Image (cartoon, rainbow, N blue to C red):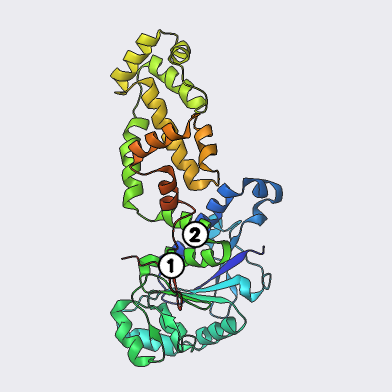
Amino acid sequence: MLPLRFDLLYLQGCLPGAMLTSIDAVMAGNTLWSLRNPEQLSRIGKSALPFRWRIIDIYGKPLHLSGLSDVMAPDADNTDDYLPARQTVLVVPGLHMATIYDLEKRVKTGAAEKALLQTRYQTGAIIAASYNGTGFLAEAGLLDHKQAAISWMISGWLSDNYPQVLLNLRHEVVVDGNIFTTGALASNYRLIYEIMRLHSGDALANSAIDATYYREERYKISADMNPVLSTKARDGIVFKARTWLEADLSRSYDLQEVANAAAVSPRTINRYFNEVLGMSPLSYLQTLRIQRAKQLLEISMLDINAIVEQCGYRNSSSFCRLFKRETRMSPLQFRRRFSFRVEKRWWRAGDATFYDTN
């Protein structure tokens, strides 16, 4: 599959954060893809990464910003005409404008920007805009009779000046054909991830969203478990035993073996664990196993039975009971909520299903 290149349009007066978050999102997508495709990455190398980015000027020519040189490879792509237009995305950032009159003047006098947008759209490129950057798309005629989002603060201006645009303020990201728009400046990450969804599927997009968005349930689960996992074991005996337990979570639990690793008796290791960590060696091991199971549910395609085995359990029923007790949801519910098989979280014009962020 050919990679998808994000062409980030550099405009005079653009909000630099919009451009930088687009770069962050592309790099996050490549990182998550690498975690899921280690064999392909090892065999082909970094050229196998699915996403590229570059910064371009209003004439479509690549720009090199020295301050970004450390992060440009391998995600950046400064080659001209390397990819067909349908494998490229033109991303229009929001602008820093003091008044709506300044914005209107900037949009209506942007002849080069208008020409670039029309050319890229006509050749089949994906067009994306955030915040007030949607105004450039409207001026170029790309939004005639199409659904689009813009900042609520200037939605009246868009409706008055471009009545043929079907304004949609109900959803975080609005997709109509090959045009993606968001009205919220803080939703620039989401804008990029929804384009990734079109190219690489739900699994990668959902994982990127879960990795970078605040989700109360996921943070609460981690908050409940991290105090245990991060407890400092000052005692050398407990440290030795913890190291031994952490080295192989899949082996069967035997208190005598744990004690042997620390060169003490089973009674002593049990007492030390309770004094230092407030739990038994078995409870500590179960906490580690649950943490590993959560990671595998999030980033792997292993089925539940395979995960149960890798976490050192021979009985899936007992594991599922323990998992639900610790996380308040079953392994399947956890996977559906935080990984591949979650529901679609985006909305496409004309689609019966959508994800309402509210």
Residue at image position (57%, 61%) is 200
Q: Secondary structure at mark 1?
A: loop
Q: Residue at x 39, y 18 (%)?
A: 238
Q: Is residue 205 visible?
A: yes
Residue 285 x, y percent position in the rendering: 42, 26
Depth check, front residue: 331 or 4: 331
Does the image show residue 230?
A: no
- Tag shown at residue 177: none
Residue 326 image point, x, y percent: 34, 37
Is residue 218 toward the left or the right of residue 125 in the image? left
Three-letter code for the amino acid on which mark 1 is drawn: Trp
Q: Nearer the viewer, residue 273 or 311?
A: 311
**Element marked by disc 2:** helix
The answer to whether 274 is drawn above or below residue 147 in the figure is above
Label 2 and label 1: CA atoms lie apart by 10 Å
Query: Do callouts 2 and 1 mark residues in contact (Cβ within 8 Å)?
Result: yes
Residue shown at 48% from the left, 21% from the top? 244
Residue drawn 51% across the image and 60% down it: 202
**Which percent across, then down, holds residue 334?**
41, 47
Query: Label 2: which residue?
Result: 205
Q: Amino acid at mark 2?
A: Ala
Residue 230, quarter of the rendered image: top left
Q: Is residue 290 above or below residue 109?
A: above
Q: Which residue is mark 1?
A: 346
